[in-house]
Image (cartoon, grey):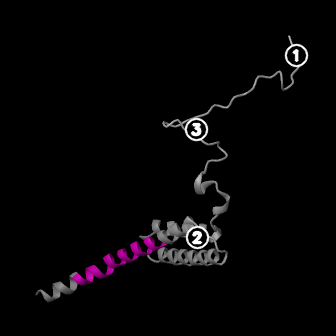
């Protein structure tokens, strides 16, 4: 028995080749394009203002039934989105999805809160006004 572990005594490893239905072999894993998730040249500008924007936007959505708090959360969330947008433009990088989602959540929270205010204050006054004229 030969106990010499040189390369010439070791069996050659053969990498399996995978092919598609047409018989073409798949590229090496190093040659595959994994898209935006692992490509180092597509970094988006993401900062604490983007995270703050989405946190305040979600808080604005969750507290839309409170009197003033969602308006404050939403306005500050939109302000943070605009700050992140300016920084991304200055650095010539695309805006992160986190900042855009924060802006959308902030706007939705403000709109829901304003609709609730309209339902509580203006609709009953309209009914009262029309009931006076109907007499």
Residue tagged 1? 3
Instruction: Give the magenta range.
Output: 106-126
Residue at 21%, 81% (x, y): give it. Answer: 127
| Mark 2 neighbour density, 10 Å: few (under 14) some (14–19) many (20 or more) | many
The label shown at residue 25 is: 3
Residue tagged 2? 95
Q: CA distance from mark 1 to mark 3?
A: 37 Å
Q: Callout 1: helix, strand or loop? A: loop
The image quadrant of residue 81 is bottom right
Q: Foreground mark, 2 or 3?
A: 3
Q: Can you name the residue that lies furthest to the top here?
A: 1
Q: Could you tell which of marks 1 and 3 lies nearer the N-terminus?
A: 1
Q: Can you name the residue that lies furthest to the bottom here?
A: 133
Residue at 36%, 74% (x, y): give it. Answer: 116
Characterize the magenta stretch by its predominant secondary structure. Answer: helix
Q: Compare residues 131 and 86 and report the one nearer the observer.
A: 86
Residue at 89%, 19% (x, y): give it. Answer: 4
Residue 55 at least partly seen: no
Q: CA distance from mark 1 to mark 2?
A: 61 Å
> In x, y percent, where is residue 87?
64, 76
| Residue 73 in the figure: left or right of residue 37 | left
């Amino acid at each position: 028995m030969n106990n010499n572990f040189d390369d010439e005594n070791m069996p050659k490893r053969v990498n399996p080749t995978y092919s598609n239905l047409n018989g073409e072999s798949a590229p090496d894993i190093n040659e595959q394009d994994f898209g935006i998730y692992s490509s180092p040249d597509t970094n988006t500008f993401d900062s604490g203002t983007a995270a703050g924007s989405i946190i305040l936007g979600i808080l604005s959505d969750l507290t839309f039934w409170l009197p003033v708090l969602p308006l404050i959360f939403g306005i500050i969330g939109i302000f943070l989105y605009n700050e992140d947008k300016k920084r991304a433009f200055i650095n010539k990088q695309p805006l992160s999805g986190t900042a855009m989602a924060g802006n959308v959540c902030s706007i939705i929270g403000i709109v829901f809160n304003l609709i609730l205010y309209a339902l509580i204050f203006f609709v009953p006054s309209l009914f009262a006004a029309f009931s006076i004229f109907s007499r």
